Image (cartoon, rainbow, N blue to C red):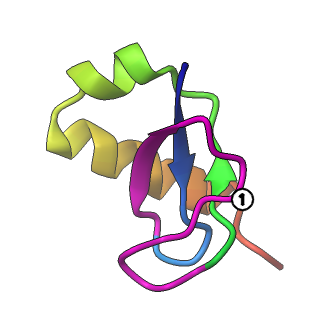
Amino acid sequence: MMKVYICPNCGWMRAVSRRKDVECFKCGEMNMELTRMTYERYAFCSEEERQSYAESWMYIHKKR
């Protein structure tokens, strides 16, 4: 089963399977976080929709 992860530092998204520890290849963060987005939705999103999702996710989950 494919899962979608997001980097809490830079917002880069990545789809992986069979992994729990996912690292960001863009900024080097070692612990990406699992999103609620399904792989099917991720696969059919345009680049703009993915960017919008990442920006929204970062806003909601920003560290205070």
Residue under label 1 = 61
Please report the residue visible at 57 percent of the width from the left and 77 percent of the height from the top: 9
Q: Report the predominant secondary structure element of the magenta stretch.
A: loop
Quarter of the rendering occupied by the C terminus: bottom right
Please tell me how crowded label 1 is: few (under 14), some (14-19), or many (20+) other residues with Cα within 10 Å. Answer: few
Identity of the residue furthest to the top in this view: 40
On the image, the x and y values in percent for residue 4 come to 51, 38
In this picture, is 40 found above or below 30?
above
On the image, the x and y values in percent for residue 32 come to 63, 62
On the image, the x and y values in percent for residue 6 come to 53, 55
- At label 1, the amino acid type is His
Please report the residue visible at 64 percent of the width from the left and 77 percent of the height from the top: 30
Q: Quadrant of residue 36?
A: top right
Please report the residue visible at 51 percent of the width from the left and 20 percent of the height from the top: 38
Q: Nearer the viewer, residue 18 or 51?
A: 18
Q: Which residues are magenta?
A: 11-29
Reply yes or no: does residue 56 show up in magenta: no
